[in-house]
Structure formats: C-alpha cells, structure tokens
Amino acid sequence: MVDVDSIVLRRKPSYPLSMWLEDYNSKKVTAEEAANIVKSGDRVFMGGGTGIPASFATALGKRAGMVKDVTVYQGYAMGLYDYMKPENRESFHIETMFVGPMERVCMEWKMAHYKPMHLSDIPQAGLDAQCNRVAFTATPPNEDGFINLSCFGAFLPRKEVILNAETVIAEINSNTPWLNSVDFLVHVSEVDYIIEQDTPLFELPEIPITDVEKKMAEIIADLIPNGATIQLGFGGLANAIGNLLYTKKDLGMHGEVVTPSVMRLVEAGVINGVKKTFYPGKVIAAFAVGTREFYEYLDHNEDFLFCEVGWVNTPEVIAMNDNLVSINNALMIDLTGQVAAESIGTKQYSGTGGQVNFVHGAKKSKGGKSIIALNATYKDKEGKLYSNIVPYLPLGTVVTTSRNDVEYVVTEYGVANLRMRSVHDRVLALINIAHPDFREELRSQATKIGWI
C-alpha cells in the first residue's frame, strides 16, 4: 500500500483513489493521438534514458512539418528519433540536461543546446523550463492506481514538472520495473492521456574493460576500506572496480546511478549497507541503467531506495554517509589539479553530471575521500600519443571540478593525493603518475612556468 498522505497530487480526483480503473480506461489513446496534442510553440518535457516514451517520441517525430518551434526538454536519450534529426529543425529543437552519444550528434547538427548543470539542479531546471506538456514512460498501475516513473524517474522531477504541466501523457510499458520509491509515484488521476506499450526497454550493454581500466581499478580498490559507502558511475572503469571489490566487507552504496555491477555486489553480500550511517541497509540511488536482467532484478526490490536526484545528489545529504568514497572519471587534468570531465577545447563530450556534487559530498563526509580517474594518455586519429596530464588545459576546455576540491587522482601509473597540497607539490605528484614518456617534458614545462 502507498502512503497517499505523503504525496502531493496534481489535482484532487473526484473518486476514491482505489476506484481508478474506469478513469484509466477512459484516458487510453494511441501514440499518434497523444502526439497530435502537441501544437506549435509547445514545450514538451520528456526526461531521459528509458524514461523517454518510445512510441510517443516516434509519433512526435512524425509531426514534423505540421508544427513549428516545439522545444523538447530531455537528457541522455537512448534512441535517435525523427524529432532530433536536422531535416526537422523548423519543427523541433532540443534542450538537454546531459550530453550522451545521441545529444553529441544532435549538437553537431545544431539541433540541441546543452544546459550546463549539476544533476542536483535537475528539479530546478524542470521548474524553469515551464513546459506545458510532459510525457514519460511508467509502469502499469498498482492496486491503488499509482504508476511508477521507474529507472529514469530522476530525470523527470514530479513536483517541478508534472504538477505544473497543462497536459500529462503516460506511456505505460509492461516491461518497466517497479522501483522502490515514493518520489517516482504518479496517480492515474493526475494523468490526462495514457498510451499502452509492451516494447522492450532500451538496454545499455556492459562496456568491455580495457587493460588500462583494470590497472586503475586495482589502485582505486586499494583506496576503498571495508565498511565504506561508495559512489560508482557506469562504464568500463566502474565495472572493473566492481570486479575487484568481492574481497571487501560491509560496503554501502549511495550514488546517482546503479548498474548491473552493483547488482552483483549486492547479490554477493559485499554491498549490504550494515555499516552505513545514513539509511543503513539500503542502496540509495536516483536512476538505473543496464540490461533486461538488471531491470527485472530491480522490480519491487526493497534493498534499493530510489529518490529524486535533487536530494540524492545534494552534498550535505551525501556527507551524511561517513567514509563516503566517490569515484568519477575525467578526460584531462592540468598540473595544478583542474579537472576537465566534459569537454576538450570547445567540443562537448559529456555533461557535468553529478561529479561535483559527489566531490563536495565526499569532502564533507567524515572519513570520506573523492577519487578522479583518467587514462594517462590518448591517441589522435593518426595514432599519435598525447598526455592527458598537461600544463594547461586546451583553450575553451570546461573546468568541471575546481583544483580547490580535488583530492585523489588516479591513472594507470599510480595515485596522487592533492588534498591541501601546494601547487609545487601537486605538480610533482601529477608528473609522477603521468605516462613515463611525458614526465621529462612536463617537468621542463613546469620549471619554465615557475611551479617547480
């Protein structure tokens, strides 16, 4: 049963909440009928990931040429829909809260604009967007008539977006897992139109682990003590770290995202949360991405508690976990410790995400530590090797995490602890974990600058 009193409804229904079935059936429409509601000049909020309603998004793309200047708010799309394509720029434009592979393509086409923000800012971004239409993927209703925003509910803030929308469209997908969450609940009475679908959810296959990632994971695993609460992202490095944690005991989890790697650690009893000082015994997360097996595992799984990202990613909330170890990736770092995690030059590769949220949270945590990991080198298209540890970041590069906040930096060559260290000492520490072929050059440049 749902604690109805804890949920602010978009509107008060004219019937007892448990008498929802007739209302549900009266609101059923096709995806095409729902898309026809969208008019020129509308602002449509569709969230991100598996939360983007696939059949509605497909039907919306077919409205190209029939509407003009429709703005779609989203983040981390897992499919390329017609409304995202350059031939439809007169009809649609995208504002994105995060940059993934699809958004990068759209930005190159000048179909999308990135809105820089921390993940903790998504609720405020949703409020500021002032969208009059909102569409999302959700589970079938429970016995009380509540549906669940599921894996990417964090990208669709209920209070800020759904409660303020003129029109709410729910795409009910029978393959969507019911997550343990109050924040992600919406009642049938709050929805205006319902589309029923049973297409498989988008999956994110596990990314193969490179030899470099294995080396970094070995170093990072040694920095994680028994009883720590960890934050892992997703990708090859996160998987590599997860594979090396099976000898650890009594770990906890508080992070924006959970993946199959976390599932396996929970099943093995490594992540059990018994030493957590905040929500002991629970894996706290804001969204989930992975395989069908993983989605099925999360369905009604009360070991996990999913909450809105504005709360999960607040540094003060993160810091309520003692011994919080945050692990995040970077693309490049300069010799003073400025971290570039989202762009090189003016080319945007990713979004700010939750990196800064968790760096700050770990810094405030009793016994906490934040770790930034990056490959020591990269190769250009011609195969020439370059260092990712540089005296200066390339012109136009965004600094994601300030050097004032950086603590541990890890490459495949070692770890540098920059916490409260002078520029002189930081430079030497970072040179020591650079690729050996670049250390002499870096030392020479640092000497010319006057850092050492």
Image (tube, rainbow, N blue to C red):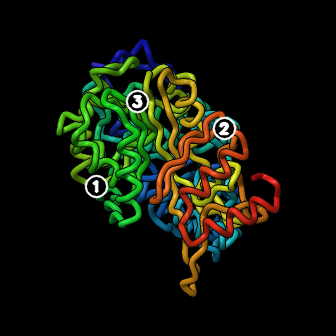
Say if 266 sits above or below 72 in the image.
above
Residue 359 horizontal/vertical position (percent): 57, 37
Mark positioned earlier in the residue sequence (3 or 1)? 3
Q: Considering the numbered disc 2 on the image, is that residue within a helix, a strand or a loop?
A: loop
Number of the label disc, if any, that sits on residue 421: 2
Residue labelled with disc 1:
291
Residues tagged 3 and 1 counted as in contact (Cβ below 8 A): no
* Residue kind at label 2, given as amino acid type: Arg
Q: Considering the numbered disc 3 on the image, is that residue within a helix, a strand or a loop?
A: strand
Mark positioned earlier in the residue sequence (2 or 3)? 3
The nearer-to-camera label among 2 and 3 is 2
Residue shown at 48%/28% (left/top)?
A: 368
Residue labelled with disc 3:
185
**Front in this rendered view, residue 273 or 148:** 273
Report which quarter residue 131 is drawn in.
top right
How dense is the environment of label 3, judged by Cα within 10 Å: few (below 14), some, or many (20 and up)?
Answer: many
Disc 3/disc 1 C-alpha distance (Å): 23 Å
Quarter containing the N terminus: top left
Q: Considering the numbered disc 1 on the image, is that residue within a helix, a strand or a loop?
A: loop
The nearer-to-camera label among 2 and 1 is 2
* Residue kind at label 1, given as amino acid type: Thr
Q: Is residue 368 left or right of residue 221?
A: right
Q: Is residue 215 left or right of residue 403?
A: left
The nearer-to-camera label among 3 and 1 is 1
Disc 2/disc 3 C-alpha distance (Å): 46 Å
Q: Residue furthest bottom?
A: 382
Report which quarter residue 207 is drawn in.
bottom left
Number of the label disc, if any, that sits on residue 368: none
Q: Is residue 353 left or right of residue 173?
A: right
How dense is the environment of label 2, judged by Cα within 10 Å: few (below 14), some, or many (20 and up)?
Answer: some
